Image: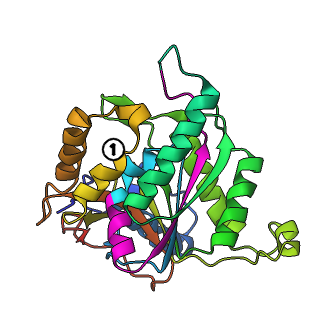
């Protein structure tokens, strides 16, 4: 099971003041503030999240192949369970080669074709390409507006993207700035852009009404609260990744082993072999007090 790495939540007013989190504002303010602080810390500890299959989902990522590494097994499962999934790639992937004979223009064309083929492997027929330059992505207002427009047009129940707060993976990998920028722009598009009517009045003129999402799933996350069982779909995940020949060559080889290894690592404390881990936010559930026991297992699917 996934377990919280944080200690038991047992602070009171004085402990909170000692940590300079609560000022001294009187007993009524203390009670309100401690209740709010307990709620915030409870959210930080991670609320148990149950797996569900959305009717429609939009997956937004920086590069061709990010989705295959991050969540293609879950997408394959969703599609088999009846979901309609759309991919959106924010950059053109044109920087992903050290071949001296390759050009950015040619690579962008190849990677677009690879992304379409990878989507088809898991049942995704529609891939959107926003066309920003690979390696230079920033979470600008322009990028945000394009993603808002896309969300309102696709009208998903769930948006999946990369966690913009993940800067490092232990001492092995510095997260690509495009990954963080894509996640940052997407979360800003989700709130307030996608569901606030007057946030983008020009979209109303295009007939694009606000969308009330059910949830957001973050991949490339260091504090997951849901691990999805992809045991029946690990081969599809690897097959979809194999479509990215410009990135991994004609022989998946070590990359295939890496993908299986990461899926096993994600499911290490689960009763299944292969998993994909997410930080999931769900908006249609009633509020519940934080768990009293942070060592209790979180959800599995």
- Visible in this render: residue 14? no
Extreme residue toward the top, this view? 100
| Span colored in magenta | 73-97
Asked if residue 294 lies left or right of residue 214, the reply is left
Identify the residue at horizontal 62%, vertical 64% (top origin): 190
> What crowding class fits label 1: few (fewer than 14 Cα within 10 Å), some (14-19), or many (20 or more)?
many
Question: Where residue 171 appears, x then y in whole percent?
Answer: 30, 28
Identify the residue at horizontal 45%, vertical 84% (top origin): 285
Identify the residue at horizontal 37%, vertical 56% (top origin): 71
Asked if residue 8 lies left or right of residue 71, the reply is left
Per the image, label 1 sits on a secondary structure element best described as loop
Q: Which residue is mark 1?
A: 242
Question: Where residue 27 appears, x then y in whole percent?
Answer: 51, 73
Height in image: 154 above or below 94?
below
For the image, the number of numbered tags is: 1
Q: Is residue 93 magenta?
A: yes
Colour setup of the view: rainbow
Q: Nearer the viewer, residue 144 or 78?
A: 78
Height in image: 219 above or below 175?
below
Question: Where residue 223 appears, x then y in whole percent?
Answer: 34, 53
Identify the residue at horizontal 43%, vertical 32% (top origin): 246
> Which of the image's four quarters has the N terminus?
bottom left
Question: Where residue 261 appears, x then y in whole percent?
Answer: 18, 44
Height in image: 25 above or below 243?
below
- Visible in this render: residue 157? yes
Q: Nearer the viewer, residue 68 or 186?
A: 68
Occupied quadrant, residue 38: bottom left
Extreme residue toward the bottom, this view? 286
> Which of the image's four quarters has the C terminus?
bottom left
Q: Nearer the viewer, residue 159 or 18?
A: 159
Asked if residue 221 lies left or right of residue 211, the reply is left
């Amino acid at each position: 099971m996934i377990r919280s790495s944080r200690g038991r939540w047992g602070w009171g007013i004085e402990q909170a003041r000692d940590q300079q989190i609560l000022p001294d504002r009187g007993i009524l303010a203390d009670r309100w503030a401690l209740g709010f602080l307990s709620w915030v810390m409870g959210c930080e500890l991670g609320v148990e999240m149950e797996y569900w299959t959305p009717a429609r989902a939009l997956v937004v990522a920086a590069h061709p192949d990010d989705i295959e590494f991050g969540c293609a097994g879950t997408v394959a499962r969703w599609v088999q369970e009846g979901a309609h999934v759309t991919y959106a790639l924010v950059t053109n992937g044109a920087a992903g080669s050290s071949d001296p004979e390759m050009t950015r223009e040619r690579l962008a064309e190849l990677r677009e074709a690879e992304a379409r083929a990878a989507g088809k492997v898991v049942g995704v027929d529609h891939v959107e390409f926003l066309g920003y330059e690979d390696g230079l992505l920033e979470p600008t207002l322009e990028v945000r507006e394009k993603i808002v427009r896309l969300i309102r047009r696709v009208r998903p129940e769930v948006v999946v993207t990369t966690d913009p707060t993940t800067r490092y993976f232990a001492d092995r990998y510095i997260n690509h700035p495009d990954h963080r920028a894509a996640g940052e722009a997407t979360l800003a598009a989700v709130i307030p852009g996608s569901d606030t009517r007057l946030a983008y009045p020009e979209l109303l003129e295009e007939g694009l009404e606000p969308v009330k999402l059910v949830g957001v799933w973050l991949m490339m996350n260091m504090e997951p609260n849901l691990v999805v069982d992809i045991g029946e779909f690990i081969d599809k995940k690897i097959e979809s990744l194999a479509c990215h020949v410009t990135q991994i060559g004609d022989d998946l080889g070590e990359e295939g082993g890496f993908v299986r290894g990461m899926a096993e690592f994600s499911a290490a404390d689960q009763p299944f072999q292969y998993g994909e881990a997410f930080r999931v936010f769900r908006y249609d559930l009633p509020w519940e007090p934080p768990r009293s026991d942070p060592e209790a297992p979180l959800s599995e699917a």
